[in-house]
Amino acid sequence: MAKISCPHCQQLINSEAINCPHCRITLKAYGHPGITLHRATQGYLCDTCTYHADNSCTFPQYPHAKDCILYENLQNRQLELEQQINVSNISFDIKLKRWLQRYQALLLLAFLLLICFLITLFR
Ligand code: SF4
Ligand SMILES: [Zn+2]
């Protein structure tokens, strides 16, 4: 089971714990281990949230949420997007290399035919 640091007392705890066993703070909403209740360590969560950045939040506690189940850190989201872009670029490079390896012989033949054609044409 993965361990996380409690956002309130910073003790190491089980990532699925509904309450922190040390400070008793609630970490999951509605008592469900799959619904994380994000908590601000300082200021408001909305200041660093993706839904604040794109102006799409409709929660009543917006823009002064101290805890929220929908919070998504803007910096983390941007990092994820950059990584996804890098992965898709890498996979394109790999695809291109595989394609070139697979059709190497055909490409060489086509190149030789083109050279022959050009020589014939400009004789
Ligand atoms: S989703 Fe929550 S944290 Fe994000 S802007 Fe809305 S209220 Fe704030
Ligand atoms: Zn705690």
Image (cartoon, rainbow, N blue to C red):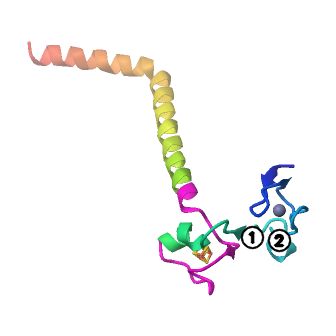
Q: Nearer the viewer, residue 44 or 75?
A: 44
The main secondary structure of the magenta stretch is loop
Residue 69 image point, x, y percent? 70, 72
* Secondary structure found at label 1: loop
How packed is label 1: few (under 14 Cα within 10 Å), some, or many (20 or more)? Answer: some
Frontmost residue, 56 versus 63 = 63
- Name the residue furthest left: 123
Residue 26 bears which disc, if any? 2
- Residue at screen point 84% across, 65% down: 33
Q: Are marks 2 and 1 in contact (CB under 8 Å)?
A: yes
- Nearer to us of marks 2 and 1 is 2
Magenta run includes residue 87: no
| Residue that appears at 48% across and 29% down | 99
Residue 48 in picture, x, y percent from top left:
55, 66
Residue 96 vertical placement versus 59 (above, below): above
SS category of the residue bearing label 2: loop
Q: Is residue 15 left or right of residue 58?
A: right
The quarter of the picture where residue 107 lies is top left
Q: Nearer the viewer, residue 66 or 62?
A: 66
77 or 13: which is nearer to us?
Answer: 13
Number of marks in picture: 2
98, above or below 45, in the image = above
Q: Type of residue at label 2? A: Thr
Expressed as whole percent of the image width and height from the top left, the position of residue 61 reads: 63, 84
The extreme right residue here reads 21
Residue range corresponding to the magenta coloring: 54-77
Ligand 1 found in image quarter = bottom right
Instruction: Give the spatial CA distance, label 2 vs label 1.
Output: 8 Å
> Which amino acid, mark 1?
Leu
Query: Residue 123: where, in percent of width, then height?
Result: 8, 12
Whether residue 70 appears in magenta in the rendering, the answer is yes
